Image: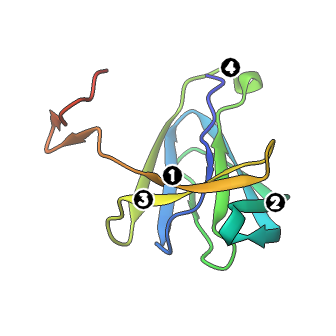
Amino acid sequence: RGQVSRIHNHADQMCWMTVPVGRLRGQNFSVLEIDEAKGFCRLKETDRFELSDCLAAKVELEEPIHQILNLPEFNQRAVSLHVYSKPFDKCLSYCRETDKFAEVPLFYTSINGKLCDGVKL
């Protein structure tokens, strides 16, 4: 409840998601201005969408920057399922407060039902 993902992209991957339990909101963003050498990126909110009851959504490759939110007013837990076109181990993460972005490493929580090294739940 009340959790939000970082604003991020999917490193040129196709992604589909659904929410079998609860309700989530997706917020998409477009790039207004970017200076990759300085790690500067100013974003603008574009469309938003809500997911529940196993409705599916996909990340648009033309505008892949987004955030997933479980808003406090939803007042419920949620589970989301994401399917990617191929594995990737990094993506770009964006901060609207500072207009900065950076590449961040990604990792698995578990593989084949076994927690990965260093993961504590």
Which numbered tag is attached to residue 86? none
Which numbered tag is attached to residue 43? 2
Q: Residues within 10 Å of mark 3 (few under 14, many from 20)?
A: some
Type of residue at label 1? Thr
Query: Pointer 4: what residue?
Result: 75
Question: Which residue is located at x 82 percent, y 60 percent?
Answer: 42
> What distance separates the C-alpha of mark 4 from that of mark 3?
31 Å
Mark 1 or mark 4: which comes first in sequence? Answer: 1
Type of residue at label 3? Lys
Vertical relation: 40 (above or below) 121 = below
Q: Which picture quadrant has residue 83?
A: bottom left
Mark 1 or mark 3: which comes first in sequence? Answer: 1
Question: Which residue is located at x 78 percent, y 54 percent?
Answer: 48
Q: Residue furthest bottom?
A: 62
Mark 1 or mark 2: which comes first in sequence? Answer: 1
* Residues at marks 1 and 4 touching, judged by CB atoms closer than 8 Å: no
> What distance separates the C-alpha of mark 2 from that of mark 3?
20 Å
Q: Position of residue 3 (x, y in %)?
A: 61, 28
Which numbered tag is attached to residue 90? 3
Is residue 40 toward the left or the right of residue 7 in the image? right
* Local secondary structure at mark 3: strand
Is residue 22 toward the left or the right of residue 101 in the image? left
